[in-house]
């Protein structure tokens, strides 16, 4: 089984820390808010995000729950960031069914992001003129 390119402890801590910071910022949560929701100290969470501390599986699970994402998603994102070929291949597999594609594409979006997309779609629909329709049929000369 091929290993990821960067598999030393420091690079894994840094990659996980970057991932946690990105996810926290995407959720529009402050460091203090997330730390409180995960029952951690803000200082500890800050050290995690900077790659200075290791995290136990219990604490990582608490962070994932506070972010309202499955912990498996964090592990998969970590594998991708470390260069795992299997994780990269899994992301490339895309179903043919458009409804399933939509479900997969939106499952990781926050409700606010989905609302923004919906509002923008409504804006586009309201501001674009309806295309003129050509009449199809016969004309009769008088």
Image (spheres, rainbow, N blue to C red):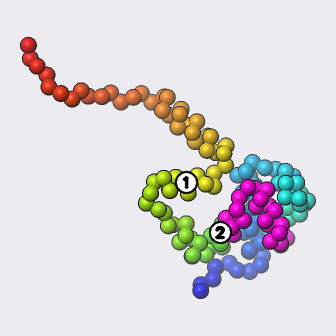
Q: Is residue 52 left or right of residue 128?
A: right
The dot on residue 103 is 1
Q: Which residue is mark 2?
A: 76
Position in image of residue 117 (x %, y %) = 58, 42
> Could you say where residue 43 lies in the image, as x and y percent from the top left?
90, 60
Q: Within the magenta stretch, is there residue 55?
A: yes
Q: Check if residue 98 falls in the magenta segment.
A: no
Q: Main secondary structure of the magenta part?
A: helix
Q: Which residue lies most toward the bottom here?
A: 1
Q: Where is residue 64, by image quadrant?
A: bottom right
Q: CA distance from mark 1 to mark 2?
A: 18 Å
Task: Tell me the quadrant of the picture where the N terminus can be found.
Answer: bottom right
Asked which secondary structure carries label 2, the reply is helix
Q: Residue at x 82, y 50 (%)?
A: 30
Q: Which residues are magenta?
A: 52-75
Picture residue at 80% right of the left edge, 71% below the top: 57
Placement of the C terminus among the 4 image quadrants: top left
**Classed neighbour count for the residue bearing mark 1: other residues with Cα under 10 Å, few (<14), some (14–19), many (≥20):** few
Image position of 107 with respect to 117: above or below: below
Front one among 36 and 100: 100
* Image coords of residue 19 (percent x, y): 72, 63
Please tell me which residue lies in front, 135 or 4. 135
Residue 111, given in percent of the width and then of the height, sits at 66, 45
Extreme residue toward the top, this view? 142
Residue 72 bears which disc, if any?
A: none
Q: Secondary structure at mark 1?
A: helix
Q: Nearer the viewer, residue 138 or 129?
A: 138
Question: From where the camera sits, is residue 60 visible?
Answer: yes
Q: Residue at 55%, 54% (x, y): give it.
A: 103
Q: Within 10 Å of the Cα at label 2, are there few (<14), some (14-19), or many (20+) other Cα atoms?
A: some
**Residue at the image point whose x is 70% and y is 52% from the top:** 26
């Amino acid at each position: 089984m091929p290993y990821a390119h960067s598999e030393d402890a420091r690079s894994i801590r840094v990659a996980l820390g970057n991932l946690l910071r990105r996810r926290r910022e995407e959720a529009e949560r402050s460091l203090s808010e997330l730390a409180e929701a995960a029952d951690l100290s803000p200082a500890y969470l800050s050290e995690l995000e900077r790659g200075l501390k290791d995290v136990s599986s219990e604490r990582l699970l608490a962070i994932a729950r506070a972010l309202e994402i499955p912990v498996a998603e964090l592990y998969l994102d970590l594998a991708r960031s470390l260069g795992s070929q299997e994780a990269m291949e899994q992301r490339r597999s895309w179903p043919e069914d458009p409804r399933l594609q939509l479900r997969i594409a939106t499952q990781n979006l926050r409700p606010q992001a989905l609302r923004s997309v919906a509002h923008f779609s409504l804006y586009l629909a309201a501001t674009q003129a309806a295309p003129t329709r050509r009449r199809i049929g016969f004309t009769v000369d008088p």
